[in-house]
Amino acid sequence: MSSLKNKTDVVLIGAGVMSATLGAMLKEVAPDWNIKVFEKLGSPGEESSNEWNNAGTGHAALCELNYTSEKADGSVDIGKAVKVNEQFQLSRQFWSYLVKRNLIRNPEDFIMPIPHMSFVEGEKNVAFLKKRLEALSASPLFHGMEFSSDHQKLKEWIPLMMEGRTSSEPIAATKIDSGTDVNFGALTRMLFDHLERKNVEVHYKHSVEDLKRTRDGSWELKVKNGFGQVERHRAKFVFIGGGGGSLHLLQKTGIPESKQIGGFPVSGLFLVCKNPEVIAQHHAKVYGKAKVGAPPMSVPHLDTRYIDGKKSLLFGPFAGFSPKFLKTGSNMDLISSVKPNNLMTMLAAGVKEMALTKYLIQQVMLSHEKRMDELREFIPNAKNEEWDIVVAGQRVQVIKDTDAGKGTLQFGTEVVSAGDGSVAALLGASPGASTAVHVMLEVFEKCFPQHMTAWEPKLKEMIPSYGLSLSDHPELFRKMEESTGQTLGLVKKKELVYS
């Protein structure tokens, strides 16, 4: 192959929701740019974006208690909750833009309305939940949230969870109807269909083995195709969106920003209900409180999901451990990610995170009966034979040196980019896919600052609240929530659900 033929403007590594989102946004602001995608698996959205490999929650901090912390004075800090909610609103606006222009169709295939609920037991937790609601109610982003500790009301909201409940412990829940279930696998496949219609070259069964900077500042990629042949491709800009596989490729770039960064893999397992009668009795995503020592991604939740047009019920996640960074990865992934420049960072994390290590060992040792016991804290009458275990995706938690100290475990999603903006990698886990549009705006600002002024009108057309804080503009938020709700079919469907 001639090297000229293999020159392109942009290369996206990995065919997950992140690359799909970046590709779709770039095609709107810079339609003439040539884009190539390399994915080592045979189709899009097979790893972390796959509907069975993530919780499918449209993370907007409506029910996730780990986004609201109690301060020393007893008040509740809602800063992170507001931030996560605003980030999800950006995704809703962009998806709505795509649907309005027929660039993707049938939004019901990837997003459905579902109440988001928080559920707690014990006097202290009930008091916290009440305070949390009061704090969130001050923000327009959380309007319509209800609180109840009344058993009769809770039976209306969560009949399956209340049936057979004998504990005398106080219980309470909050409920908000504006929550969503998002099938990120279906969304990813839709976006890649759209990109291929826009002449984006998508190469499946192509694995990026190496990348290095050339004299002219572009990047040369060594790519192995499905026949085992090596191809060379050049790009002015490279986005590494390979999920757990991103860390290794980032390390191969050799950029200074890739140093002192490590990763720790955690896998997730879910219990899936097999009984349609049980599935029909529950209609909500219900999040509880994480156990002491558990990572935020292990907050227990009982989820109504829509997968392949069918209603499902899942509970989890239970943490598992595998040294692989991807479900389809290698058992050598963790060891090979340890380099001289991040060794001390990794060792420091090992010392600091003893509680997490202990938690993971306990989780790995759990029997089916023990997992069912945890489920029975949510569904007292759950029967062993009605639930199967499914292994969800691998998540690589970022370990880096921060102001909080050496070897700090980061629970979140972050972009690492070169000083000249020629390469960017996405690392981390939750809230992940829900905030894909926010993450890509960050990539734009870090990597294409010279284009931002020219792109701004188009960005505002795609994302009307771009550059504004919705919590500071309640009227705009209400307008956006209503218009995106109608375009994505959430309003109409919600009415049908409750009629």
Image (cartoon, rainbow, N blue to C red):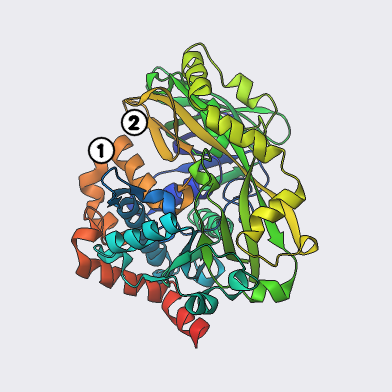
| Residue 439 locus on image (x, y percent) | 38, 45
The image quarter in which residue 278 lies: bottom right
Residue 252 visible in the snapshot? no
Residue 478, how many percent across, how many down? 27, 71
Give amino acid for label 2.
Answer: Gly
Q: Read off the residue under disc 1.
A: 449
Residue 437 shown left or right of residue 192 in the figure: left
Q: Position of residue 38 (x, y in %)?
A: 57, 39
Crowding near the residue tagged with mark 1, few <14, some 14–19, many ≥20 C-alpha atoms within 10 Å: few
Alpha carbon distance from label 2 to label 1: 9 Å
Mark 2 or mark 1, earlier in chain: 2
SS at mark 1?
Answer: helix
Q: Residue at x 27, y 56 (%)?
A: 458
Q: Which label is found at residue 421? A: 2
Image quadrant containing the N terminus: top right
| Residues marked 2 and 1 touching at CB (< 8 Å) | yes
Q: Quick check: 149 left or right of 421?
A: right
Picture coordinates of residue 101 (x, y %)?
A: 40, 68
Considering every residue shown, the one lying at the far right of the view is 385
Q: Which mark is residue 438?
A: none
Q: Secondary structure at mark 2?
A: loop
Res 340 seen here: yes
Q: Which quadrant would residue 385 be assigned to in this image?
A: bottom right
Mark 2 crowd level (few <14, some 14–19, many ≥20, 10 Å Cα): some
Between 456 and 345, which is closer to the camera in this rendering?
345
